[in-house]
């Protein structure tokens, strides 16, 4: 309804036909979903702030060469580029926030010592590379970046931050799946590029027959063939074949084993009990980007990761050789997380008490409600109060009368008139 619409307008509960459709892949967020997303963002960023993270807000687009310098795991075809009219320069709508964080750290924080702990709430825009529809897709993300802390210490901090944030939201059962980029990278390092690409694809699919065929005659054959079977409970790391017990692979597995042990203890210390840890040594996600442990968060419902991240120690050097610092980052996919939270009936999705106030003296009582943290929206025409409350998701109606405040639910069941203080106490306790 327009802000200047008549106050006695009749509300319609029908869904109008869109006369002005949005571009493919774009959508509006209407109440109450927008409010729920704000609640999720407040919960995550509030948790991040308790760990010492400061929120930043980089621009929605910037020069394409800056974005592409820190592209990471994304396909270049996913970037939406256009020519900026004022300068004629090619700019890009951000498909990822991490390159922007890297630029900020190397250009805007002179004189500030590391570690840099930065958090964000942002939307990114990606094309669906390879999709026939070529639709655009706007993705809401909540993320943190930790730059300047030694490997494993930084990875552990981000994992504990994210796990405790999810637990605080009310998502108590989820899985953290961990891998290590150096495991597959070291085994593929000496292969011809096209063979390495085929092998990486076979590892991702856990296609043992293909791996055996491609690895025939290779020095790392036994190790490559063994990788797909090593996934699941972290105890698999204690029963490794001899082929994985030497060189860079063994060092990476030792890192992963150490991270798992520390993470288990930290989650126990934080009182987070519903987390399942798993490992996957054949994971090849982002081999060209990640330099150490990487991870994904899964929960019942969406069928895709609700969050992902990892260590990317080489990114800062792409922006400034003087700031070649260790770095880790993690982002939550808000759409997927919302799905999981709804299925879990998480408390973060519980909207604050919202009351429609009507009758003589509505302004005074609404002001008192707000002072107690209860939403009080005034509807001057009493006959419209129930329809308004039902249409906009209000739980109760408070009708102010000379005898007191009469509270009713949306079914019209009303109690007796109460003194304002007693009415507020009742609404606060519901």
Image (cartoon, rainbow, N blue to C red):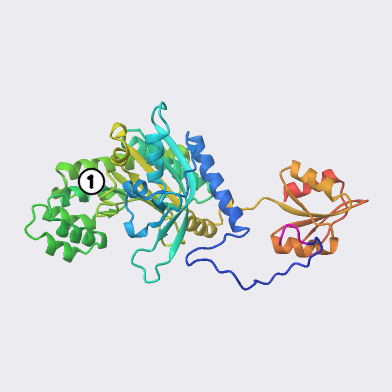
Q: What stretch is highlighted in magenta?
A: 1-5
Image coords of residue 337 (percent x, y) = 48, 55
| Figure check: 141 above or below 302 | above
Which residue has dot 1 on it? 182
Image coords of residue 10 (percent x, y) = 78, 67
Q: In which quarter of the image is the N terminus?
A: bottom right
Q: Is residue 2 magenta?
A: yes
Tally of numbered tags: 1
Is residue 58 toward the left or the right of residue 394 in the image?
Answer: left
Residue in view at x 71 percent, y 60 percent:
2
Residue in view at x 59 percent, y 55 percent:
34
Q: Residue furthest left?
A: 217
Is residue 125 toward the left or the right of residue 260 in the image?
Answer: right
Q: How crowded is mark 1: few (under 14 residues within 10 Å), some or many (20 or more)?
A: many
Q: Which of 249 and 261 is in front in this view?
A: 249
- Residue 430 seen by the camera: yes
Residue in view at x 32 percent, y 56 percent:
76
Q: Nearer the viewer, residue 268 or 407?
A: 407
Image coords of residue 147 (percent x, y) = 37, 36
Q: What element carries label 1?
A: helix
Residue in view at x 75 percent, y 67 percent:
11
Q: Which of 141 and 216 is in front in this view?
A: 141
């Amino acid at each position: 309804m327009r802000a200047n619409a008549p106050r006695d307008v009749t509300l319609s509960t029908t869904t109008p036909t869109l006369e002005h459709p949005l571009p493919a892949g774009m959508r509006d967020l209407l109440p109450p979903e927008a409010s729920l997303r704000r609640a999720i963002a407040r919960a995550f960023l509030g948790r991040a702030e308790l760990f010492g993270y400061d929120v930043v807000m980089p621009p929605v687009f910037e020069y394409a060469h800056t974005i592409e310098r820190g592209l990471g795991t994304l396909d270049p075809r996913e970037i939406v580029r256009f020519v900026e009219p004022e300068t004629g320069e090619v700019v890009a709508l951000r498909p990822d926030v991490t390159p922007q964080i890297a630029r900020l750290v190397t250009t805007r924080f002179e004189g500030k010592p590391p570690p840099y702990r930065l958090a964000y709430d942002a939307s990114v825009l990606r094309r669906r590379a390879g999709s026939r529809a070529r639709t655009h897709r706007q993705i809401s993300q909540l993320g943190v970046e930790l730059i300047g802390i030694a490997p494993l210490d930084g990875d552990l901090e981000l994992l504990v931050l994210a796990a405790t944030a999810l637990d605080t939201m009310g998502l108590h059962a989820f899985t953290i799946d961990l891998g290590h980029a150096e495991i597959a990278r070291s085994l593929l390092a000496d292969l011809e590029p096209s063979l390495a690409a085929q092998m990486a694809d076979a590892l991702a699919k856990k296609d043992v027959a293909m791996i055996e065929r491609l690895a025939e005659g290779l020095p790392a054959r036994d190790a490559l063939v063994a990788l797909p079977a090593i996934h699941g409970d972290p105890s698999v790391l204690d029963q490794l074949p001899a082929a994985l017990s030497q060189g860079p692979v063994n060092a990476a597995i030792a890192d992963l084993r150490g991270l798992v042990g520390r993470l288990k203890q930290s989650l126990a210390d934080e009182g987070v009990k519903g987390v399942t840890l798993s490992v996957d040594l054949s994971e090849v996600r982002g081999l060209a980007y990640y330099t150490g442990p990487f991870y994904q968060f899964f929960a019942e419902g969406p069928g895709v990761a609700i969050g992902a991240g990892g260590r990317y120690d080489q990114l800062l050097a792409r922006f400034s050789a003087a700031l070649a610092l260790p770095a880790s980052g993690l982002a939550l996919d808000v759409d997927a997380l919302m799905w999981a939270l709804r299925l879990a009936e998480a408390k973060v999705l519980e909207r604050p008490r919202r009351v429609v106030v009507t009758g003589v003296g509505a302004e005074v009582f609404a002001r008192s409600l707000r002072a107690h943290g209860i939403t009080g929206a005034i509807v001057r025409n009493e006959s419209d109060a129930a329809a308004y409350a039902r249409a906009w998701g209000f739980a109760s109606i408070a009708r102010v009368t000379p005898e007191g405040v009469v509270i009713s639910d949306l079914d019209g069941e009303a109690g007796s008139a109460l003194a304002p203080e007693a009415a507020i106490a009742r609404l606060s306790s519901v």
